[in-house]
Image: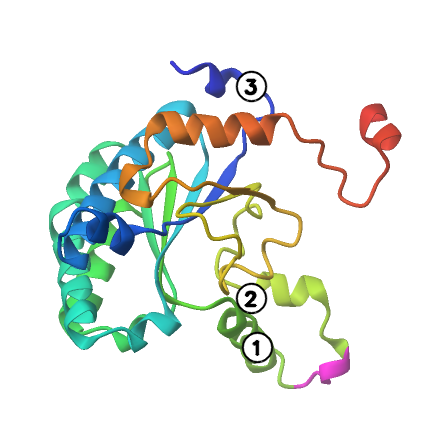
């Protein structure tokens, strides 16, 4: 077992922006889709490692609301990869006690993909190990707007002035999970790109130049090690944190 798993400073919830698939492929004179295929293999390794070291939740940004603007051929191939993953990987996730959730507006996907999302989520719903959230057709701003609309629908008799932060949080995606402790972004970019922008108010950020298809268990341990050396104050002083 990794030494990381024995640290009390290990993050309970890790979020990852899996960036760099296209650049990985370009460097090797391969089509962009080859990078996405290799990136999927990297995700398999990370999911397995998170399960082994006792991470409670892993949320990965697979496809944003903005990604529909990409070339149609690339979008079509990504949808095909998504469907294949739902069809072929869920049994393995279930065998490893992983609970799969698809986070985002699934209505934009084909009927076939939507059906397999339901099958996958139903199959793994009672698993008690790692919760794997795949953010697909997800946007952080849309998440907040939808939360406000859900709150209003649930409370038609209330005035908007009664809406508070707790109420919004309760209507967001991932409302039943702790906020991400650590965000990892690969590929060298240093921004959060509309990913979990409400939930990550106090998340520790870790940026690496490693392209996602090359991201390994060792790189994950390195990110967790960096997280473990940080002091999380949440608005308090260092002295207050030490007293706690």
**At 49% across and 62% down in the image, what residue appears?**
193
Dominant SS type (magenta) = loop
User: Residue 161 falls in which quadrant of the image?
Assistant: bottom right
The color scheme shown is rainbow
Mark 1 vs 3, N-terminal side: 3
Tag 3 secondary structure: loop
Depth check, front residue: 98 or 77: 77
Mark 1 vs 2, N-terminal side: 1
Depth check, front residue: 127 or 3: 3
Gap in Å between the C-alphas at discs 1 and 2? 10 Å
Q: Disc 2 or disc 3, which is closer to the eye?
A: 3
Q: Which residue is mark 3?
A: 7
Mark 2 vs 3, N-terminal side: 3
Q: Residues within 10 Å of mark 1 (few under 14, many from 20)?
A: few
Tag 1 secondary structure: helix
Gap in Å between the C-alphas at discs 2 and 3? 32 Å
Q: Position of residue 135 (x, y in %)?
A: 37, 58
125 lies left or right of 53: left
Gap in Å between the C-alphas at discs 1 and 3? 41 Å
Depth check, front residue: 208 or 79: 208
Quarter occupied by the C terminus: top right
**At 32% across and 31% down in the image, what residue appears?**
216
Q: Which residue is mark 2?
A: 171
User: Residue 10 falls in which quadrant of the image?
Assistant: top right
Q: Which residue is mark 1?
A: 154
* Up/down of 86 relative to 142, above or below: above
**At 44% across and 48% down in the image, what residue appears?**
188
- For the question of whether residue 71 can be seen, the reply is yes
Quarter occupied by the N terminus: top left
Boundaries of the magenta span: 157-161
């Amino acid at each position: 077992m990794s030494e990381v798993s024995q640290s009390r400073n290990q993050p309970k919830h890790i979020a990852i922006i899996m960036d760099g698939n296209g650049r990985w492929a370009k460097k090797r004179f391969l089509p962009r889709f080859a990078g996405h295929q290799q990136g999927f293999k990297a995700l398999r390794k990370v999911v397995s490692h998170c399960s082994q070291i006792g991470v409670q939740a892993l949320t990965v940004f697979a496809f944003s609301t903005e990604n529909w603007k990409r070339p149609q051929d690339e979008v079509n191939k990504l949808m095909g990869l998504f469907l294949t993953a739902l069809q072929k990987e869920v049994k393995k996730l279930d065998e490893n006690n992983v609970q799969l959730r698809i986070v985002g507006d699934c209505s934009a996907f084909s009927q076939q993909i939507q059906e397999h999302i339901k099958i996958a989520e139903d199959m793994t719903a009672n698993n008690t190990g790692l919760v794997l959230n795949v953010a697909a057709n997800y946007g952080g701003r849309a998440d907040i707007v939808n939360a406000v609309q859900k709150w209003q629908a649930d409370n038609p008799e209330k005035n908007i002035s009664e809406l508070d932060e707790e109420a919004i949080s309760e209507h967001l995606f991932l409302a039943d999970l702790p906020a991400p402790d650590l965000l990892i972004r690969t590929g060298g970019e240093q921004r959060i790109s509309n990913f979990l922008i409400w939930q990550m108010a106090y998340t520790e950020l870790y940026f690496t130049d490693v392209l996602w298809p090359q991201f390994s268990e060792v790189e994950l341990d390195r990110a967790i090690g960096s997280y473990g050396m940080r002091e999380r104050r949440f608005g308090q002083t260092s002295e207050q944190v030490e007293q706690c």
